[in-house]
Image (cartoon, rainbow, N blue to C red):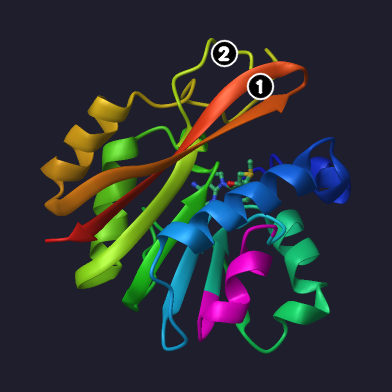
Amino acid sequence: MTDLYKERAESYDSEDCAEELSAAIGAMMLSKIPFHNQMHVMDFGAGTGLICSHVVPVVQKITAVDISESMLDKLKAKPEFHSKVDTVCRDIINNPIDEKFDMIMSTFAMHHVEDTNKLIQSFAEHLETGSLIALVDVDTEDGSFHAEDSQGVFHCGFDRDALKAILEMNSFKNIGFVATHHFKWDGKEYSAFLVLASKG
Ligand SMILES: C[S@@+](CC[C@H](N)C(=O)[O-])C[C@H]1O[C@@H](n2cnc3c(N)ncnc32)[C@H](O)[C@@H]1O
C-alpha cells in the first residue's frame, strides 16, 4: 500500500494551525467523553499522535492504528508515548486486529476511507457491546479542505444525518452529535463535529 503521508509526515506537526486545532479538538474530546484510567482505546488514523497526546494521560492504553508507516514512526519517536501507546500499521477493514477495545476514537481520518459503511462495520467488530465510538471529522464542505490534487481523499466532509443512518445500520445506539468546533484552515472556515455512539 502506498504511504500517502510519506513526505507530509516530516512537517505534519508543524503545519499551520495543526497544534492549535489538535489542542482544541483534544479539549473538546476530554470535556465530552467519559474516559477513565482502565480503558484500552483504539485511535483510528492516529497519524503522528497529536490527539493521542491529549488522551493518553487519562486512559490505560492506546493502540494507534494507521496505514502510514511514516506517520506512525513520528508517533513512536515521542517519548511520552513509550509506556502507554502501541502502534498497528495495517488496514483494519481487510485485516482486523484480533482484540476488542473499550473505545474507538478517530479524528480527521474517516474522510480518507472510501467505504464509510465498511469502516463503521469494522469499528463495531472491534468493540464490546456497550462500548463507545467517538468520531471527529469535518462537516460537509465544498472540497476546499484539501488541495485539488490530493490523493486518498474520498469525502468532502460528512452530512450528519447520512452518518447517523450508517451508524444506525450497524446497530450503534445513543447516537449524539455532542459538540462542534469551528476553525479556520488555509484562511477558510470549516466546522468539525464530535459524534458519540455506543455499540448495541
Ligand atoms: C489528517 S490525518 C489525521 C491524523 C490524526 N488523527 C490527527 O488528528 O492529527 C489522517 C490520518 O489517517 C490515516 N489513514 C488514512 N486512511 C486510513 C486507513 N484506511 N486506515 C488507517 N488510517 C488511515 C492517514 O495515514 C493519516 O495519518
Q: Can see residue 87?
A: no
Q: Residue at 62% x, 79% y: name it.
A: 57
Q: Residue at x 41, y 49 (%)?
A: 135
Q: Dot 2 lies on which element?
A: loop
Q: Amino acid at mark 1?
A: His
Mark 1–mark 2 CB contact (< 8 Å): yes
- Is 117 positioned to the left or the right of 148 in the image? left
The residue identified by callout 1 is 146
Does residue 11 lie above or below 112 as drawn?
below
Marks 1/2: CA distance? Answer: 7 Å
Name the image quarter holding residue 151: top right
Numbered tag placed on residue 143 in the rendering = 2
Question: Quarter holding the C terminus?
Answer: bottom left
Q: What percent of the width, then of the height, locates residue 195?
A: 35, 45
Frontmost residue, 153 versus 175: 175
**Residue 199, position as x, y percentages in the image:** 19, 61
- Residue 111 shows up from this direction: yes
What's the magenta region? Answer: 50-62
Is the CB–ligand 1 distance for label 2 below 8 Å?
A: no
The answer to which quarter of the image holds residue 66 is: bottom right
Please tell me whether residue 158 is drawn above or below residue 22 in the rendered image: above
For mark 2, does the 10 Å Cα neighbourhood hold few (<14), some (14 to 19), or many (20 or more) residues? few
- Callout 2 amino acid: Gly
Judge from the rendering whether residue 69 lies leftward or rightward of residue 112; answer left or right: right
Task: Name the one closer to the observer, 147 or 165.
Answer: 165
Q: Please, what secondary structure does the residue beneath circle 1 have? A: loop
Q: Position of residue 167 (x, y in %)?
A: 21, 43
